[in-house]
Image (cartoon, rainbow, N blue to C red):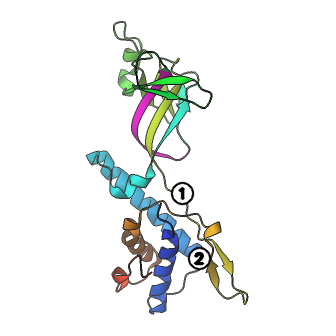
Amino acid sequence: MAKGLLNRLHSGINQLYSQGQGRYFPPDKKDEAINSIQIELFEELVEEYQRTQRLSDYLLPFQDFKDQPVAGGFANLPIDYGHMTGLQGLKEAGVSEKTETDISGTTYTETIAKVILDGEWGERVNDPVLPPELEFPIVRMTKNKIQVEPKEVPFIRISYIKVPTDAIWGFTMSSDGRSYIYDSNTTTELVWPVTAFKELLKRSIAYLGIPMKDSIGISYKNS
């Protein structure tokens, strides 16, 4: 997360206004633009990842993983889930040397979970020769959950790209009530790295309909 990135974007947009480019936008309108274009950029980069299996530097801060409990053969997707990058089953220790310990002190072993296509699921679940086992679990994606076999797998580790959260530029009002004063304590910051500043600014001003004549000259440092 780049500390102060959201404020820099707001300042960059304000700088264009002070130069006579476009009209003035209050903080909520700038937030609306920034949040709209960050989802647009995020979706484009996820599509690129799906094609190339290479993660853009812009997406590195969005990498995450969660250990989700399995109940009745199903695990919920994380609430901030965007796109899957990997799955692992977590079972009781005893087979592999790679182990994880949860907060209760119970130790689990990591095993790679094989993702199965819907059309192959029934055949694979009922395979008499190589049925799903704790050492070799299988999974498939459903609408909002991950189905796991065998059902006795206690946890599934989901590695994924999390979706961006809405950024909120926090502020207080000046004593005369005419100016917005930035407040980092009430700001919900952007997760993007500093290197994404120009791309985010370019898309934000396009969203707001501001002429792009001199915007490319605004840097992270001087915004």
Magenta stretch?
Answer: 79-91
The residue drawn where x is 37% and y is 6% is: 128
In the image, what residue type sits under mark 1?
Thr
Q: Is residue 211 above or below residue 80?
A: below
Horizontal and vertical percent for residue 139? Answer: 43, 26
Horizontal and vertical percent for residue 49? Answer: 32, 49
Q: Residue furthest top?
A: 128
Callout 1 crowding tier (Cα within 10 Å): few <14, some 14–19, many ≥20: some
Label ID, residue 116: none
The residue drawn where x is 44% and y is 86% is: 16
Residue 44 visible within the image: no
User: Within the image, what quadrant is residue 104 found in?
Assistant: top right
Asked if the residues shown at circle 2 and circle 1 are in contact, with their CB atoms under 8 angstroms apart, the answer is no
Q: CA distance from mark 2 to mark 1?
A: 17 Å
Left or right for 23, reference 176:
left
The residue drawn where x is 52% and y is 27% is: 155
**Secondary structure under the numbered disc 2 in the rendered image:** helix
Horizontal and vertical percent for residue 194? Answer: 41, 67
Q: Is residue 121 above or below residue 169?
A: above
Residue 159 visible within the image: yes
Q: Is residue 82 magenta?
A: yes
Q: Is residue 210 above or below residue 96?
A: below
Label ID, residue 165: 1
Q: Is residue 167 magenta?
A: no
For mark 2, what is the residue?
27
* Front-most of residues 54 and 143: 54
Q: Magenta segment, principal secondary structure?
A: strand
